[in-house]
């Protein structure tokens, strides 16, 4: 049978038709047989057990009971009208309520009718009732008992009004599975199915939609989770394999003068062990003949810039140029200065190219790049403009990669005949499991150690009535020669309002910290680049005491003398953002402080975020909490990874399955990189099916 059968439009399923199909597609994203097959129930209810009415003590779950109608009432008028059926069993009574569809229900049952009731109790005025339950005559129930595990499917209000509720979806799914019986292709090799005692694919689809019992449901879930994670990993690793087979990398065979003299004479401190380890990994990649695609993760302040610089020096030692790309002009500037300072009087020519580089300068730079006299170019997006041509580009470093799209990275390749080695750096720690998926096609290095002598930043939470205390504290710190950041949220949808907040905050601070004793700077996204830069520079030079800013300073800015970070409306920031902001202080020798200001009303999530920040300074721990709060969908970089499309597996809970799936994907590709062996035939068919509508990113990273 052809696998394309699964792509049959859903309207052809019995009982669907064009109108319902359109609704299902629009509202639920179910357009084909396959979509419905993989539209899994979100929960199951055990219908094999009847509750006694007196036993009901929680509104947490759906329950089932049976009893006789003991009273029927119509209460209220117009929009407030309710229809109430009271049900009685040997233990007590409970009211069933209808607010809608009253005309339909009102004459259906009489006092004395025996019913099976199925629904979710809620507590009202100290009594449980059930609104809009499912009802069935006891006699009917006994003649054909319902499936023991009753699946619940997500629906939308709109589609429910048109009569497609969870029950109807359940019926559709069931009839589809029965119709496809015997023709759903297996997608996993027999060896894997055996090794992990997985059930077959068809059986899994059946039991996920109408389980025979709990045990089979568990097996169906296990099988489908494995399949889902396995194919995501296989696809990612395949990109990696294909790339490493087809794409030759520049070989950097030796370490020369630049690297060595920098290491011996210019490096102002000892590298941390983690930095050394990562540099070794990078060296190994660069010498291997394969093109490096490596992700470098390291918490804020862990010293990634230095690793980047030393990697670039290796490129120079082998006669190649290097470039470093940063997401903002401020950052590019800063990298330029840091790197120039590190290099001192070494014979390495570095320059800076950003949107505000003047044309004449730019032309000069282009010339030097083409002739090879310019060794390291640092910049923003301006770097990927077409007119920039290198003589021999061998190494590209991308800082804070989540701001660069896959396509932008791809354009860098065009800058050189052989694709350059790529090092992507990120300070947004993400849990390992997620990294395996989001960056599953990149090699992965981590700096898990901070340079010695860093004092942990002290973090406090104040409600808005604590401002007075905070101002006093700020004054003390300024007396001691420290500098301070005050950050306001700036979130796009309410940008004008936020800007007003920021400006009002600034005005207030100007009153509390009056000139000439105190000097303030302000930086926000609406300023022109050169204004931003000059305000920033005043702060960097220590001419201003307080930097009032939006999150534009979130990434990478390095002012060691700044020791206090005050975050206003901290409840509006995400965890990783708070962590990034906090990372702006604690860079010098002094004790640093982070103060989170919030309103009195905090959502439960906001409370957890604030508590986590106060309690922990470990980026990986924080990212774990973040992932649990938000789910993977909101994390940067998840869009292309398939995490977003997960239908049954859970990146947090199913870590063990993920690891096994990845291991096997790896083993299979090592043995059969082209997937040409007979035993991998099923895998290829399924991959082709999954890839049928997909752009191939295989050559890009
Ligand atoms: P990030 O990883 O956040 O980009 P940076 O590269 O900006 O971190 O480094 C943070 C600070 O730590 C810088 O001031 C840098 O000079 C310093 N630093 C980096 N490596 C070391 C080290 N091994 N020992 C001491 N200080 C270091
Ligand atoms: Mg950095």
Image: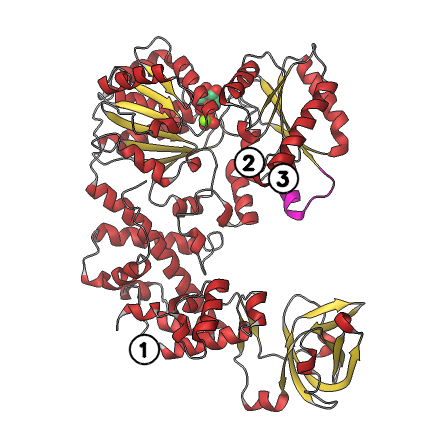
Closer to the camera in the image, 102 or 588: 102
| Residue at disc 1, secondary structure | loop
Instruction: Say if mark 2 contacts mark 3, CB within 8 Å.
Output: no
| Residue at disc 3, secondary structure | helix
In the image, the residue with mark 3 has its CB under 8 Å from the nearest atom of ligand 1: no
Q: Is residue 272 visible?
A: no
Identified at 66% across, 48% down, the residue is 604
Main secondary-structure element of the magenta-colored stretch: helix
Earlier in the chain: of badge 3 and badge 1, it is 1
Residue on which disc 1 sits: 182
Mark number, residue 644: none
Residue on which disc 3 sits: 572
The magenta region covers: 599-611
Q: CA distance from mark 3 to mark 1?
A: 53 Å
Q: Is residue 445 above or below residue 75?
A: above
Earlier in the chain: of badge 2 and badge 3, it is 3
Is 289 one of the magenta-colored residues?
no
Earlier in the chain: of badge 2 and badge 1, it is 1
Q: Is residue 348 above or below residue 657?
A: above
Instruction: Say if mark 2 contacts mark 1, CB within 8 Å.
Output: no
Q: CA distance from mark 2 to mark 1?
A: 51 Å
What x and y, as percent, mark residue 56? 71, 73
Is 609 one of the magenta-colored residues?
yes
Residue on which disc 2 sits: 577
């Amino acid at each position: 049978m052809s696998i394309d059968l699964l792509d049959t439009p859903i309207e052809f399923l019995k009982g669907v038709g064009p109108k319902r199909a359109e609704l299902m597609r629009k509202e639920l994203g179910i357009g084909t047989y396959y979509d419905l097959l993989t539209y899994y129930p979100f929960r199951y209810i055990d219908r094999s057990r009847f509750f006694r009415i007196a036993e009901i003590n929680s509104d947490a779950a759906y329950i089932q009971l049976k009893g006789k109608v003991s009273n029927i009432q119509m209460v209220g008028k117009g929009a407030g009208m309710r229809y109430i059926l009271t049900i009685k069993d040997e233990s007590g009574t409970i009211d069933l309520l209808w607010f809608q569809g009253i005309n339909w229900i009102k004459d259906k049952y009489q006092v004395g009718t025996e019913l099976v009731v199925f629904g979710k109790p809620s507590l009202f005025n100290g009594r449980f009732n059930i609104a809009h339950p499912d009802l069935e005559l006891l006699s009917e129930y006994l003649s054909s008992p319902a499936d023991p595990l009753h699946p619940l499917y997500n629906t939308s209000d709109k589609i429910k009004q048109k009569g497609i509720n969870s029950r109807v979806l359940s019926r559709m799914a069931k009839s589809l599975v029965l119709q496809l019986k015997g023709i759903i292709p297996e997608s996993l090799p027999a060896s894997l199915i055996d090794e992990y005692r997985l059930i077959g694919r068809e059986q899994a689809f059946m039991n996920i939609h109408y389980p025979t019992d709990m045990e089979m449901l568990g097996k169906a879930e296990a099988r489908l989770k494995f399949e889902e994670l396995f194919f995501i990993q296989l696809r990612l690793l395949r990109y990696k394999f294909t790339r490493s087979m087809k794409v030759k990398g520049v070989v950097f065979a030796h370490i020369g003068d630049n690297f060595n003299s920098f290491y011996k004479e210019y490096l102002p401190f000892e590298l941390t062990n983690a930095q050394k380890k990562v540099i070794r990994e990078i060296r190994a990649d660069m010498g291997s003949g394969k093109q490096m695609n490596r992700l470098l993760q390291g918490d804020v302040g862990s010293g990634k810039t230095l690793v980047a610089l030393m990697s670039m020096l290796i490129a120079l030692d082998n006669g190649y140029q290097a470039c470093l790309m940063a997401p903002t002009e401020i950052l590019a500037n800063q990298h330029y200065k840091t790197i120039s300072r590190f290099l001192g009087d070494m014979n390495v020519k570095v320059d800076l190219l950003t949107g505000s580089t003047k044309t004449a300068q730019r032309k000069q730079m282009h010339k030097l790049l083409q002739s090879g006299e310019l060794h390291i170019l640092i910049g923003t997006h301006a770097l990927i403009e077409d007119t920039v041509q290198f003589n021999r580009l061998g190494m590209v470093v991308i800082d804070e990669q989540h701001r660069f799209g896959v396509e932008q990275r791809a354009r860098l390749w065009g800058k050189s005949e052989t694709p350059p080695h790529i090092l992507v750096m990120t300070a947004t720690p993400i849990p390992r499991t997620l990294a395996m998926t989001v960056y599953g096609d990149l090699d992965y290095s981590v700096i898990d150690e901070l340079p010695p002598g860093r004092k942990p930043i002290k973090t406090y939470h104040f409600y808005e009535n604590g401002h007075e205390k905070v101002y006093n504290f700020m004054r003390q710190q300024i007396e001691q020669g420290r500098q301070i950041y005050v950050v306001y949220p700036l979130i796009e949808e309410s940008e004008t309002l936020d800007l007003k907040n920021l400006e009002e905050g600034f005005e207030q601070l100007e009153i509390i910290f009056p000139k000439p004793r105190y000097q303030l700077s302000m930086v926000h996204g609406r300023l022109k680049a050169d204004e931003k830069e000059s305000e920033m520079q005043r702060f960097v030079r220590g001419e201003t005491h307080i930097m009032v800013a939006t999150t534009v300073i979130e990434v990478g800015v390095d002012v060691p003398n700044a020791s206090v970070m005050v975050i206003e409306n901290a409840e509006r920031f995400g965890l990783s953002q708070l962590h990034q902001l906090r990372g702006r202080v604690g860079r010098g020798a002094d004790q640093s402080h982070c103060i989170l200001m919030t309103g009195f009303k905090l959502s439960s999530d906001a409370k957890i975020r604030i508590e986590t920040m106060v309690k922990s300074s470990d980026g990986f721990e924080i990212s774990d909490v973040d992932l649990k709060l938000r789910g993977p969908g909101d994390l940067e970089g998840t869009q292309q990874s398939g995490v977003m499309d997960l239908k049954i597996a859970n990146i947090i809970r199913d870590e063990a399955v993920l690891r096994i799936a990845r291991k096997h994907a790896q083993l299979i590709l090592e043995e059969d990189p082209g997937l040409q062996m007979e035993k991998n035939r099923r895998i290829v068919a399924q991959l082709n099916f999954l890839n049928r509508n997909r752009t191939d990113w295989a050559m890009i990273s």
